[in-house]
Image (cartoon, rainbow, N blue to C red):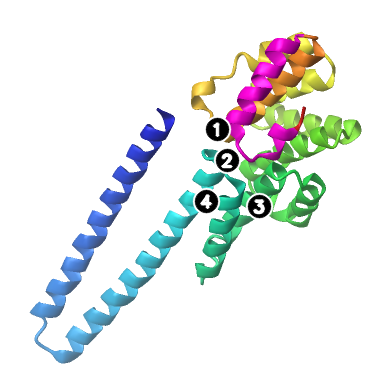
Amino acid sequence: MKMVIWRSFYYGKKIFIWLIYLLFAFYIYSLVLSSEALGARLFFGCIGVAVLGIVCLFEYLKILYDQMIYALNVSCDLKKAVQIKEHLKKKDLFNGFKQSIIIFDSLLLLDTGNYTDCLDHLHKHRKFFHGTLDYLFIYYHTQMYCYYFLKDEKNLTITLEKLFQLKNGQKKQPQGLFSWHEISGMRYFHQKRNQKCLQELALIDTARLNNRELTYLLHLKGQCLLELNQQTEGHRLLKQARAIGNTLAVVQVI
């Protein structure tokens, strides 16, 4: 159902945009035909071709970007996501997607299980991630999972504190990129307060999650249940996470 809704919205939006571009092309064509002077025709023709060329390139790159995001977040197909990313980088002549790739690479490194490399990547682009509140939220949230999987208790505690400082110290909150219930659940799990962890995670509206996010949620729930010695339910959720998460490294963690 999520996939049907996503595709309907996506293609509906694309059709509307291309109708606008088509109208612009007809407008330029009419200007060329109505101009009597050869210089005017050449001017309008060159302007039209240049604008439409740039627009078509951007739309093509945007399609690749959307496919890349879909491969990671919905299909959870890391190999396909990497292939599309490399193709996008080759075709992005003006580096218009450079910043988006920086963010994407942080998620990709996390999802492939390269946690140390992911932390290095975040540190390398630290200035970029500190540029906006939303980027900073992504920065600490990604660190949180890296330290969790690396079992680095000290740095996980520090990162969780940083996240809650963002929540409590800002008048403007991050734009719903991640659930605070998930972050609270992680903190309780880290503190071995497993019942509180499950209570927080139960408050998350799973209908709003993509498959990647749902996989991480099911993993955390499953691990929490295993800690409570609820083996059957815990392993059931981990099995469900493996079915949804496809190639993500998180589904390999037991």
Gap in angstroms between the C-alphas marked 1 and 3? 18 Å
Which residue is under mark 1? 211
Please give the label number shown on residue 28.
Answer: none
Q: Nearer the viewer, residue 123 or 64?
A: 64
Res. 212 image quadrant: top right
For image coordinates 62% across by 13% down, the residue present is: 202
Instruction: For marks 3 and 2, give the one nearer the viewer.
Output: 2
Q: Secondary structure at mark 1?
A: helix
Q: Earlier in the sequence, mark 3 or mark 2?
A: 2
Q: Is residue 218 left or right of residue 226?
A: left
Q: Position of residue 184 (x, y in %)?
A: 72, 21
Q: Earlier in the sequence, mark 4 or mark 3?
A: 4
> In what quadrant of the picture does the C terminus appear?
top right
Which residue is under mark 4? 68
Gap in angstroms between the C-alphas marked 4 and 3? 11 Å
Q: Position of residue 35 (x, y in %)?
A: 11, 82
Q: Dot 3: within a 10 Å radius of its alpha carbon, few (fewer than 14), some, or many (20 or more) residues?
A: some
Gap in angstroms between the C-alphas marked 4 and 2? 10 Å
In the rendered image, residue 239 lying in the magenta stretch gets the answer yes
Q: Nearer the viewer, residue 68 or 30?
A: 68
Q: Nearer the viewer, residue 246 or 37?
A: 246
Amino acid type of the residue tagged 4 in the rendering: Met
**Residue 177 in view here:** no
Q: Position of residue 98 (x, y in %)?
A: 59, 61
Q: Earlier in the sequence, mark 4 or mark 2?
A: 4
In the rendered image, residue 159 lying in the magenta stretch gets the answer no
Marks 1 and 3: CB-CB under 8 Å?
no
Which span of residues is magenta-colored? 230-252
